[in-house]
Image (cartoon, helix red, strand yellow):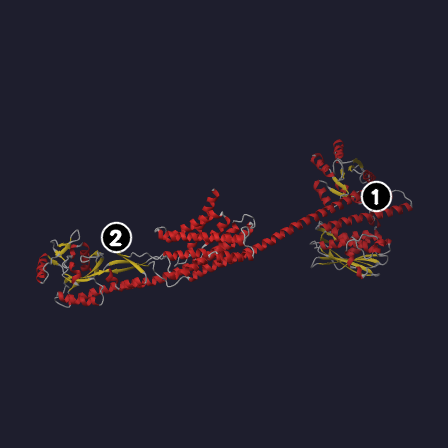
Amino acid sequence: MQRNFLHFILAAIGYFVAGRIGLELAIPPGFASAVWPAAGIALASVIVLRRLPALLGLGVGSFVINLGISSGGYENIAPGTILPALLIAFGAMLQAGVGCVLFSRFIGRVEFLDSPTRILRFVILVIMLGCTIASSIGSLSLLLAGFIPVAAMWFTWITWWTGDSIGVLIVTPLLLVLADQERRFNLVRKLQIVVPSFTMLIIVYALFLKSINYTDQEHNLIIRSHTDEFSQRLQERLRISENKLVAYSAFFNASNYVSRTEFDQFSAVILDSDQVFYGLGWTPIIDHAQRLETEIKLKQEGFPDFHVTEFSSDGTLISAKIRNEYAPVLYIYPFQRNKKAFGLDLLANSSRKEALTKAKELRRAVATAPIMLAQEKEKLKAVILYLPVFLDDTSNHKFAGFVSGILRLDGMLGSVSLDADSRNLSFNIYDETDLNNPISLFESSDNSLAGFEPENYYTEFGERRYRIEIYANENFNFGGRDWSSYVILTGGFLLIALFQIFLLLITGSVEHVQRLVERRTHDLKLAMDEANAANRAKSEFLSNMSHELRTPLNAIIGFVNLCLRTPLSPKQRDYLNKSALSSTTLLSLINQSLDYAKIESGKLELNSEDFSLLELINKLNALFSLQASNKNLDFEFSISGEIPGYLIGDGLRVEQICLNFLSNAFKFTEKGGVYVHLQYDCSHSILTISVRDTGIGIPKHQLEQIFEVFKQADTSTSRRFGGTGLGLSISRELALAMGGEIKVRSTAGVGSEFFTRLKLPEVKGSQLITQSDVLLDHAEMLGDPSSIDDVLVVSNANSGNSTPLKNIRILLVEDVVINQILAQEILQEFGAIVSVADNGKVALEMLERHGAFDVVLMDIQMPVMDGFEATERIRQNPKYADMPILAMTANALDIDVDNCLAIGMQGHISKPIDIMILMKEIQKNI
């Protein structure tokens, strides 16, 4: 029940408010608004809310608003105004109900206008057909009630139908979008539809107001032109009346005596052309004796009842009281309609006396304030204009008396009043000589035209100030309808409706595409998650395999190297050397597999730091000079011009590319030589390195596949020379990562040339190196064969000390027994005192018993307690804050190195152990 009442109230208030808005959009004259948003509110209410309460609510809202229109703002409520309002409300309810049925039947209650088919049905059935109901019932109701003539029936019906249609087309879809409870329209889509629509509504309404204002200005100009003309004509008549009265002054001066007959004849001439005056009179100033003589004389002339009179307090004429002076009206024309004023003493009335006195003093015409005439039966106000007459035949211009002219409103206005009525203009006239006490001379009963203010004009007449208020009354016609505002309003709102339909279609299509994209994205995400999971599994597999392979390989390489340090027969040394070479090859394969895994997973990171190009050349020279000597091959370096000694980039990766090029060159070259050439393009910061050999070469048709993974030019190549086919593929990916490339030129049986171009900026201010610098270092290298061997470069090496780690206490934390034995042998051979802990927990106990060691070599993957946890526990004790901890582990990935450093270790030594690297790291940290 409560919900029904709420829906009833919502529908009633919604319709009433929308109706008030529609009335603001009405273009007079007429009863139908050009756009009626309430029709859209009605249909949306019945669709969204409970049907019966909504229908009753919108019926009440329609009745209330239309009753206000028909009764003139609820001031004239009667059966004749109530019945049309009821019929119009019934039409609104019926139209909304039928529209709801059509919407539900042909579009669907839960469907929205987001397809061309539904929109077409909505326009044809719900709007074009459904909106004929209210317009038909409403127009017929207004016609029967007499509010519109038969001639206006068709226009009213069309305007009503158009207003309802546009209202439904705009408002209903907007409300259905905003009231969506099934999440077919998300907030973004609602804003995409509502915000542009409301923006355009504001723009159209602003244009409509501008057009209305312009039309109002034009209408004001039309009214102003009429009122200006009316005012000018009225003022002209007042001037004419004053001028006609001035003629009497000349008339009296032209004769020694003016008889009553002469006065009447002259007055007849004055009034013949224009009845501006209601009456004309002659008034001399006489004393009491003259009064008595005048009364006797006039009785003798045929006026037996003549007396000098005045008004009593009750408005009746009585004989004038005795006073010193009198101003009786002795001549008056026309006599019959003005005979009550015959003999009236003007000095008995204060207003008349004031006017006479002022006129005599100023010697010009003076008007009285609006007064009631003695001879007037209709009790209409009039004005009497008094003109003093002075005789010119005397030296002192003797005062003779006053000529008076009586002006009633009809005489004052003349034909001007008829013209004003024909143009539906009305007026009010006020005497504002005394601004504190204005007097109304005439007030019209006509109502002014709504929306237009009266025009005020001021004029002087007979020393009095009049305000003439002229206005267009409610019957005023401008001669046509405001079609420009009508077109702007209906055309603009129709454009908004079409634009809204376009938005519904576009956003519906976008929403459909977004849902497809979301589904596809979800599917893709699942596929990506599966791929990432597979990639992580692969990475974990490679890491674990690397760890598991490096652990036994560490023991193999370590013990082989230890054996090579003992006295051996030539055959034993040959066997062990071959074992060491095979182990090194296996380690290279593991490292290359890890590099390729990093590249494939996108986790390869490049450093950007200064590195020495000359050191790189010397290292390559040292690594491959012995091999060149053993194979009796030429090995030369050359430089074009001058190149920077220091560049910015990842020097290790540049070295890796060069090592791969040179390894292949020496592997596939049996005679001739290997030649390295370097040049640098300063303008583009490009370093070009080429390695040319005189080896077996590569057939042209196999050049493309040598950069593929696990591919070599010929399968027999792998059997004959060994190799995995990963080196060139990794080198190309490294070059691409550094913004460069790798190219190859080769001829089978002649040789090959590999070259790479890498973008490596030079270090500003670095010294340039030339060919002579390379030759000098090469000569020094050849003069010192020991530099070619993998000897340990330790702090005491130059002093000939064979035990550089003498008395250095080292804690070895390692769980694999064979690795413990190998590490102990190596370290003890260099003089170290080694203590072994099987896991991290044992290491902590040994530190507790024996105190700090000079250095700790920590494995990572161990039972009970791994290396990370052990390191954290050690660093928590302030006593061991400065004790060096070096990771010595088969976890050799970059992330493993980063994790070790992040946990508090000072370095990382990967297995298999490189004795030189081991010694360097220990000596660097002790």
Badge 2 amino acid: Asn
Where disc 1 sits, the SS reads helix
The crowd level at tag 1 (other Cα within 10 Å; few <14, some 14-19, many 20+) is some
Task: Examine the rendered structure and indicate whether residue 287 appears above or below residue 849.
Answer: below
Of residues 56 and 744, the one drawn nearer to the viewer in this rendering:
56
Residue that carries the numbered disc 2 in the rendered image = 437
Where disc 2 sits, the SS reads loop
Residue at 65%, 52% in the rendered image: 520
Of residues 869 and 540, the one drawn nearer to the viewer in this rendering:
540
The crowd level at tag 2 (other Cα within 10 Å; few <14, some 14-19, many 20+) is few
Of residues 812 and 618, the one drawn nearer to the viewer in this rendering:
812
Query: Which corner quadrant of the image does residue 643 belong to?
Result: bottom right
- Image marks 2 and 1: residues in contact by CB distance under 8 Å: no
In this image, 411 relative to 228: left or right?
left
Residue 860 image point, x, y percent: 75, 40
Q: Is residue 181 visible?
A: yes
Residue that carries the numbered disc 1 in the rendered image = 556
Badge 1 amino acid: Ile
Alpha carbon distance from label 2 to label 1:
129 Å
Residue at 56%, 48% in the rendered image: 182
Choose the circle earlier in sequence order: 2 or 1.
2
Residue 609 image point, x, y percent: 70, 50
In this image, 297 relative to 922: left or right?
left
**Res. 131 mark:** none
Q: Is residue 194 visible?
A: no
Residue 924 image point, x, y percent: 75, 42
